[in-house]
Image: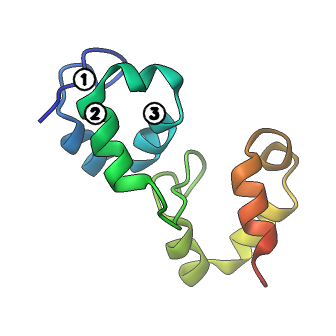
Amino acid sequence: MAELNFGKYKNKVISQVWEENKSYCQWLYTQPMIKNYPEIYKFLDDNLKNKKDYYMTFGKYKNKPLSWIIENDSKYILYLKGNDYVKENLTKLYEIVNKLNI
């Protein structure tokens, strides 16, 4: 399995990083440089491509999937819908929560 040779998870295997911090993996997958690491990119692609869930990258539910938040704290979805930071900086999350009927 491919090991990261950069960043905060340097010298860790990508599957271990996946178990520890899915939101980091989600972010890493969107970085153009990751395509320079084919084994890591393939692992992330296999685990994230066409997945419907979104993993939080901040806040009290960091690393939790959006589906879990919907089931356990739907009021937080309302908070995300009205949050200017989410609207301006996390456009994918903003689009997802605004499609929800909560």
Q: What's the amino acid at mark 1?
A: Leu
Image quadrant assignment for residue 69: bottom right
Q: Mark 1 points at which residue?
A: 4
Quick check: can you spot residue 21?
no
Contact between marks 3 and 2 (CB within 8 A): the answer is yes
In the structure shown, which secondary structural element does the residue marked by tag 1 occupy? loop
Q: Which of marks 3 and 2 is in front?
A: 2
Label 3 vs 2, first from the N-terminus: 3
Q: Which residue lies furthest to the top in this view?
A: 6
In the structure shown, which secondary structural element does the residue marked by tag 2 occupy? helix
Q: Mark 3 points at which residue?
A: 28
Q: Distance between the residues labelled 1 and 2?
A: 8 Å
- Position of 87 with respect to 44 (left or right) is right
Residue 79 at x, y = what percent?
79, 64
**Front residue of 33 and 6:** 33
Question: Which quadrant of the figure contains the C terminus?
Answer: bottom right
Question: Which quadrant of the figure contains the N terminus?
Answer: top left
Contact between marks 1 and 2 (CB within 8 A): the answer is yes
- Position of 74 with respect to 65 (left or right) is right
**Front residue of 69 and 41:** 41
Residue at (34, 35) in percent of width and height: 41
98 relative to 22, above or below: below
Residue 74 at x, y = what percent?
67, 79
Residue 92 at x, y = what percent?
71, 52
Q: What's the amino acid at mark 2?
A: Ile
Residue at (47, 63) in percent of width and height: 51
Q: How many labels does the image show?
A: 3
Q: Mark 2 points at which residue?
A: 40
